[in-house]
Amino acid sequence: MHCSFVRLQVRSRAVVSAPLILSVWLSFAGNAVAQGIVTGAVQDSIGTGINGAQISVTGTAIRAESNDNGRFSLRGIPAGPASIHVRRLGFAPTSVDVVVTNGATQHVDFTVTPVAQRLSGVVVQAGQPRHYEGYLAGFYERRDRGFGRFITRDEIAARNPMRMTDMLRMVPGLHISSNDLGESHVRVRGNRCWPSVWIDGSPANAAEFDIDWLQPDNVAGMEIYSGEATVPPEFVDPLGPRLCGTIVVWTQHGEPRKKRTMSAAELAEMVTRLKVYTAEQVDVPAQADSTAPVTPLYPDTLYRQRVPGHVVAEFVVDTAGRSEPETIGIVSSTDARFSASVARAILQARFIPAQLRGRRVRQVVQQPYAFVVPAVRARRP
């Protein structure tokens, strides 16, 4: 009975006041979906984007994380007043109140201030004597001696070739050809014979080796020697070709591979659970071991272009004084090539572990790196 009465009332109003009901319904529907978007960036005091910051809207489940450039986007925020909060491990939290307009996008930038103790900054000066470590140490030392021609990982990444022979075409004195089967042939200085090829320090060819069997993404560096007199002794194979040039290839298999890198949020969760400590939570904070300093290499392409830059890295120092590879992340950076150089150096670095109540503990640290190009002095007339 009651249900029939309700239906009768609705039908009656629909007939008598249809325009009014339609207007009310549209108004209700509009309010129900009234939403806006807030975009922005999280930056440090000099305007470099902060990666891994957590951005949230008070009273909602809306969340976002800043990317490598510090940018973020919050969608579906209810129209009206809203409070946007920013948190990131190692920085003081901050917030701002905004008024969200239905269907509109509002832009808000945040500047965050570091609060955690950072390790002493490392200055990488272009042109300073270099000390190389790791499986590519010999590659860079031979390059610095000036014999042969060298192709670095940075150059390969910048060119992004489809095939490795595309990189060799830029080397003077090399001739690249292919046969009907699609096999590539490299010849040095017009020789008819094929060059000797070495892969990660071992001879690769008893017969001709097709360089295009190598994937560009898997090559860390190449050395090309056009004459027998310039070939380093370690790449002379008495049983292999010696008079037709030598090509030495270093793959990225030789570099230690790390697990999936932890996000800033996962690292913060470890701190919350006391699996890892911050500088404020320990008695003696972790610090760099001055007896074993490791300085990143200045990326060649950026050095030649005289591009300065800076990087802030974040990682966990374990109880043995080593960095934990899966925790190495970049908080801020002016160029991804600087970031890659810093990450490689951190893997080789040594530290003095943090201590809490007389025992060694794991600590998350941040360390700034500055890449500096010395000013060119004008010559006196």
Image (cartoon, rainbow, N blue to C red):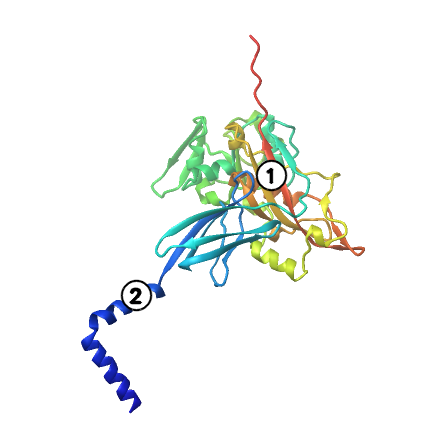
Q: Is residue 180 visible?
A: yes
Instruction: Please give the name of the residue rendered at 43% of the width and 40% of the height, measured from the top-left corner.
Output: 160
For label 2, the crowd category at 10 Å Cα-Cα, with few meaning under 14, some 14 to 19 and many 20 or more, is few
Where residue 115 appears, x then y in whole percent? 64, 47
- The span from disc 2 to disc 1 (Cα, nearest Å) is 68 Å
Instruction: Please give the name of the residue rendered at 33% of the width and 41% of the height, measured from the top-left corner.
Output: 180
Q: Specify the label residue 136 is tagged with.
A: 1
Q: Secondary structure at mark 1?
A: loop
For label 1, the crowd category at 10 Å Cα-Cα, with few meaning under 14, some 14 to 19 and many 20 or more, is some
Is residue 131 toward the left or the right of residue 196 in the image?
right
Q: Identify the residue position indicated by label 2 in the image.
A: 27
Residue 141 vs residue 242, the one in the foreground? 141
Please say if 302 is above or below 270: above
Taking the view exactly as shown, the residue that stands out farthest to the top is 381
Where residue 300 appears, x then y in whole percent? 54, 32
Q: Secondary structure at mark 2?
A: helix
**Amino acid under label 1?**
Leu
